[in-house]
């Protein structure tokens, strides 16, 4: 019998979750890993709400604002 695997939770669950406004993607949480989650998504699927969030190290210059928590 093998011992159970102990894997860390996915990044999106540890730091923040994707949420929708109303049919666009944004983020919720501390904001430390916004590019890691949003950069793989098509930019036309991102929320267009203001004010935009400037983040160093991402593919985009600005990202959507934090949305409501996705439960």
Image (cartoon, grey):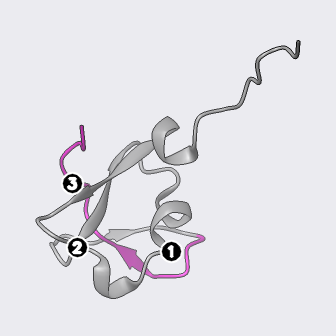
Residue drawn at point x = 16 percent, y = 72 percent: 50
**Horizontal and vertical percent for residue 49?**
15, 73
Please identify the quadrant where the N terminus is shown.
top right
Q: Which residue is mark 2?
A: 47
Q: What segment is highlighted magenta in the picture?
A: 57-71
- SS at mark 3 in the image: loop
User: Do the CB atoms of the residues marked 1 and 2 lie less than 8 Å apart?
Assistant: no
Pointer 3: what residue? Answer: 67
For the residues labelled 1 and 2, the Cα–Cα distance comes to 13 Å
Q: Position of residue 16 (x, y in %)?
A: 41, 44
Closer to the N terminus: mark 2 or mark 3? 2
The reply to whether discs 2 and 3 touch (Cβ–Cβ < 8 Å) is yes
> Which label belongs to residue 55?
none
Relative to 60, residue 12 above or below: above
Q: Secondary structure at mark 1?
A: loop
Q: Are marks 3 and 1 in contact (CB under 8 Å)?
A: no
Residue at image point 44% right, 76% down = 41
Which residue is at a point 37% across and 47% down the rendered structure image? 17
Residue at 41% in and 42% down = 30
Crowding near the residue tagged with mark 3, few <14, some 14–19, many ≥20 C-alpha atoms within 10 Å: some
> Which residue is under mark 1?
39
Please give the count of numbered marks on the rendered protein.
3
Q: Residue furthest left?
A: 22
**Where 9 falls versus 50 (above or below)?**
above
Asked whether 68 falls inside the magenta stretch, the response is yes
Secondary element at image label 2 = loop
């Amino acid at each position: 019998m093998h011992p159970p695997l102990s894997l860390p939770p996915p990044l999106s669950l540890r730091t923040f979750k994707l949420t929708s406004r109303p049919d666009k993607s944004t983020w919720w949480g501390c904001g430390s890993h916004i590019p890691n989650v949003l950069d793989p998504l098509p930019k036309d699927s991102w929320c267009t709400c203001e004010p935009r969030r400037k983040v160093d190290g991402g593919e985009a210059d600005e990202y959507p604002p934090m949305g409501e928590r996705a439960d």
